[in-house]
Amino acid sequence: MFRYEFIKNALYAILIITPLFGIIGTVIVNNKMAFFSDALGHSALTGIAIGALLGVTNPTISMVCFGIIFALLLNKIKDIKVTSRDTIISVFSSTALALGLVILSKNGNFSKFSNYLIGDILSIVPSEIIALLVIAIFVIVFWFLFFNKMFAISLNSSLAKSKNISVKLVENLFVVLVALIVMMSIRWVGILIINSLLILPAAASRNIARNIKEYHFYSILIALFSGIVGLIVSYMQGIATGPTIVLIASLIFFVTYFIRKKIGD
């Protein structure tokens, strides 16, 4: 299968994307941000729709711009004490999804963008792989500079503030980074399943990790394994790659869950 150029490109993309999902997913799971990342994925439709209205030829540009604004907005309103954080984020997620669908469905134009729902990693080209590589470098730099601060914030934000950590700045930088990763990957992963790829590897890793280093290592390893095996299985069976990767990651989650339960018993 690897004699085909499009398969090689897909493999290169998976080798870049899945470790990013694995490492970023650990913070999302730790900070209970599953609703946030899901809402961010749904907002991609609105980003595409706004781009279409403005005549933007490359939907990724409008998705990234809108995604960053939407992520910063969610990060700001999540601190409102009127109702629960999950409720607020769900309202914004539903609104963004519905707004995107309404705009794109006008005059029957939604069919042009329906491929964004499940993605198609086999369509990725070398220039797009380079763009993902640049994002990966940003993630690595950010991780080395801010990991300790993010970890402190996830443990206790009040304590982090007492240590002169700018909690809001670090949180805003992190959500912008998540927005970049999500929006740059939507076209190949798919709006419907991108949150699963962010959450499942980290959740599975959490089941078996004994410390923070193992937590990150297992999450990256599970994400990579799911991506590579999912690509191979999808090619051999003639099925969609993204959903297959998610199913592999889901299987690993349940296996690790029962391993933890067995050890706990």
Image (cartoon, grey):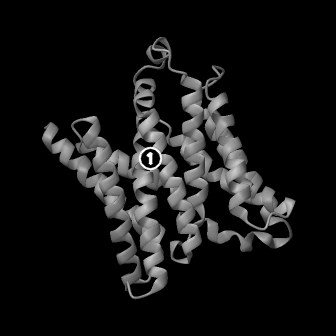
Residue lying at 67% horizontally and 53% vertically, measured from the top left:
64
Q: Viewer-proximal residue, 171 or 241?
A: 171
Which is more toward the observer, 263 or 153? Answer: 153
Q: Nearer the viewer, residue 92 or 156?
A: 156
Which residue is depicted at the point 60% across and 52% down? 41
Q: Residue 28, image x and y in percent? A: 46, 40
Give residue 151's quadrant in the image: top left
Q: Position of residue 123 (x, y in %)?
A: 56, 77
* Residue 193 at least partly seen: no
**Residue 59 in the image, given as x and y percentages of width and height:** 72, 63
Image quadrant holding the N terminus, namely: bottom left
Side of 56 where 255 appears, left or right: left
**Within 10 angstroms of label 1, few (less than 14), some, or many (20 or more) residues?**
few
**Can you say whether 214 is above or below 126 in the image?**
above
At x 85% / y 60%, what residue is drawn?
53
In the rendered image, the residue lying farthest to the bottom is 3
Q: Which residue is mark 1?
A: 140
Quarter that holds the C terminus: top left
Name the residue: 38% across, 65% down: 227
Left or right: residue 257 versus residue 130 is: left
Q: Is residue 94 visible?
A: yes
- In the displayed structure, 150 sits above or below 225; it is above
Q: Position of residue 61 (x, y in %)?
A: 71, 58
Identify residue type, mark 1.
Answer: Ile
**SS of the residue under disc 1:** helix
| Residue with the most extreme top position | 162
In this rendering, the answer to whether 8 lies above or below 217 is below
